[in-house]
């Protein structure tokens, strides 16, 4: 069996706690065993659901049990493309955590899985370069449900979750006479 041996990295999350996660594997590997859809096994999906239990049962959408569920099929379809002209590629599983800790736990699980599972990070899907398209299948981790927002006007900074849109940030900042001006 293949065992990853990735060095650990410490990253600072929005709540200022240090969380240790392994880097995402760069090789594309798939599981040829039974009970899989695109290399994503039922055991992996169960483990991801356990990690995201605070985010609710809809936090992990898997192709293997989405058939006939229009909402789940739409989530998988949306995660298969972005706003670019690049071809879409089927997402096999979409994970929608609501905390940075859940994201770190899911990335760590996928990287340590045997064989490691390819992860595609995704924000709002507004990119124009195809970076959020899961060309290798695997799992899409959507960050759009990370909704923390706090503005600190005295020190002129804000702590913003990945799912907060610029207009939302500006609306909150306007309460203090501030504006976040940069535009991508």
Image (cartoon, helix red, strand yellow):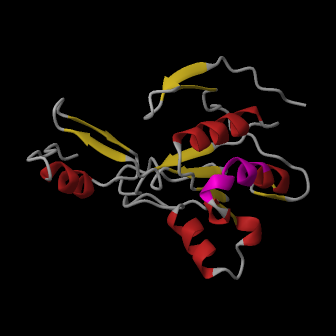
Of residue 14 and residue 128, the one placed in the foreground of this image is 14
Answer yes or no: is residue 178 visible: yes
Could you tell me residue 69's position as x and y percent? 67, 80
Residue 180: percent from the left, percent from the top? 16, 44
Q: Residue at x 76, y 70 (%)?
A: 65
Q: Quadrant of residue 57?
A: bottom right
The image quarter containing residue 117 is: top right
Name the side, left or right, on which 82 lies relative to 173.
Answer: right
Q: Residue at x 54, y 61 (%)?
A: 80
In the displayed structure, would residue 138 be above or below residue 57?
Answer: above
Describe residue 14's horizontal placement relative to residue 25 as left or right: left
* Residue drawn at 31 percent across, 44 percent down: 150
Residue 128 location (% of width, % of height): 34, 53
Count of residue discs: 0
Residue range in magenta is 47-55
The answer to which of 161 and 15 lies nearer the viewer is 15
Residue closest to the eye, 57 or 132: 57
Name of the residue lying farthest toward the left: 177
Is residue 27 magenta-colored?
no
Look at the image and tell me whether residue 39 can be seen. Answer: no
**In the image, what residue occupies the spot 55% across and 20% down?**
10
Q: What percent of the width, then of the height, locates residue 167?
A: 22, 57
52 within the magenta span = yes
Q: Quadrant of residue 119?
A: top right
């Amino acid at each position: 069996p293949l065992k990853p041996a990735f060095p650990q990295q410490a990253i600072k999350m929005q709540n200022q706690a240090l969380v240790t996660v392994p880097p995402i594997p760069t090789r594309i590997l798939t599981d040829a065993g039974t009970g899989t859809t695109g290399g994503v096994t039922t055991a992996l999906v169960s483990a991801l659901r356990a990690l995201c239990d605070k985010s609710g049962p809809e936090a992990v959408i898997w192709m293997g049990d989405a058939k006939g569920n229009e909402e789940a099929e739409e989530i998988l379809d949306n995660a298969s493309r972005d706003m670019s002209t690049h071809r879409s590629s089927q997402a096999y599983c979409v994970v929608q955590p609501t905390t940075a800790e859940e994201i770190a736990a899911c990335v760590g699980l996928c990287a340590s899985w045997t064989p490691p599972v390819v992860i595609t990070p995704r924000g709002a899907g507004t990119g124009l370069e195809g970076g959020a398209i899961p060309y290798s299948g695997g799992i899409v981790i959507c960050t759009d449900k990370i909704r923390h927002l706090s503005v600190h006007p005295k020190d002129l900074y804000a702590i913003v979750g990945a799912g907060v849109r610029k207009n939302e940030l500006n609306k909150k900042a306007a309460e203090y006479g501030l504006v976040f001006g940069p535009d991508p």
